[in-house]
Amino acid sequence: MNPKSGSIRLTGTVEIVDAEGNLIETIENPKFCGCGHSKDKPWCDGSHKKVSQPVSALENARLSKTAIEPFAPETGLALQIREKLVSARTEKNESIVGLKIGGALESKENQTGVMIYGFLTDAMDASRGFDTAEFIYPRAEAEVVFKISKEISTPITLDQVLEHIDQVSVGMEIFDYRYGQAQIYSNDAVADNAGAAAFAVGEWVTASHTVFDGLQTNLRCNSETIESAPLSAIRGNPWEAIVQLSALASAQGLTLNKDWIIFSGSATKGVLMTSGNTYAVETPGLGIVTVQAQ
Ligand code: FES
């Protein structure tokens, strides 16, 4: 077994027989497909490389802190790459704690904005420390965070959000695409797990339909406000982010689990984080969260 590609190689001479035991073929050292993507099953035809090569490139980019060029995978491949990258984290005992919502343009040809999401793990919690040297181009965004109190497995409406979310918070989402500052289209963004890098959550507040109404959020570096925006900049009303995510996740067969945290997507532009500075998202009426960048 090759654990990287999922292919299964048998060494020696292998006789392939039918159900009655009649010899069909004799093969030396056959390699079977274990990844499920071969067009010549049960044999491995090398298709696994379509996934493993970009996964390696993305992982190497993170390790070397060197941006790579976007590679515009098709949608199915982008999802497979994201799955491999997230699995690599869970295999290292990281736990998925929620999702971050993001946005990207559909493609070069179609400049429509689309919602995407990435998985957050406990290792991304910036309260454990945040070292800019571990990232390529980390940027902070001012968001709100939802805590799921009852799983969401089907599309929900605005009227139903409080049946599934009982607490909300101010949040700082830190994203770090492995493509540096290049324009990133949706499939590249999905492949890179929506650039999910780190996050910080403030104090939890009891959720209500009006909890975000009229609030303004400020993203600060030390004592200076760098970005400021109303929370209504998040899809007109941050609750809409959950409504739209429920439809997207459900279409992709993903259940939003109880106790997951969901970052709403940003109210502000991303602010580049540099070592030695303290960053804060302050939303008067909701709370404040700070991250010290090492
Ligand atoms: S393991 Fe090679 S194509 Fe599936």
Image: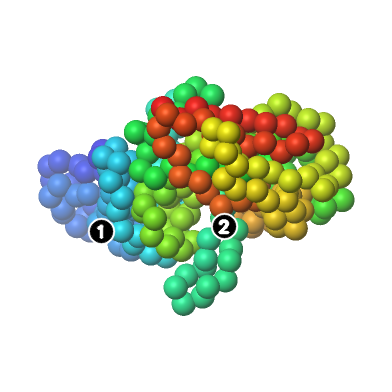
Q: Local crowd at mark 2 within 10 Å, few (<14), some, or many (≥20)?
A: some
Number of numbered labels in the structure image? 2
- In what element is the residue under mark 1? loop
Q: Name the residue under label 2.
A: 103
- Residue 97 is situated, as x and y percent measured from the top left of the image, at 58, 32
Quadrant in the picture for the C terminus: top left
Residue 86 seen in this snapshot: no
Position above or below: 73 against 230:
below
Quadrant assignment, res 224: top right
Pick whichever of labels 1 and 2 is earlier in the sequence. Answer: 1
The residues tagged by marks 1 and 2 sit, at their Cα atoms, a distance apart of 35 Å
- Label 1 or label 2, whichever lies nearer to me, is 2
Tell me if the residue at label 1 has its CB under 8 Å from ligand 1: yes
Crowding at mark 1 (Cα within 10 Å: few <14, some 14-19, many 20+): some
Residue 130 picture location, percent across and down: 45, 28
Is disc 2 placed on a helix, strand or loop?
A: strand
Q: Position of residue 72 (x, y in %)?
A: 38, 64
Residue 211 visible within the image:
yes
Could you say which is closer to the camera, residue 90 or residue 162?
162
Identified at 34% across, 33% down, the residue is: 133
Is residue 228 shown left or right of residue 52?
right
User: Residue 257 vs residue 173: left or right?
Assistant: right
Residue position for label 1 = 45
Q: Judge by depth and name the residue closer to the eye, 278 or 68.
A: 278
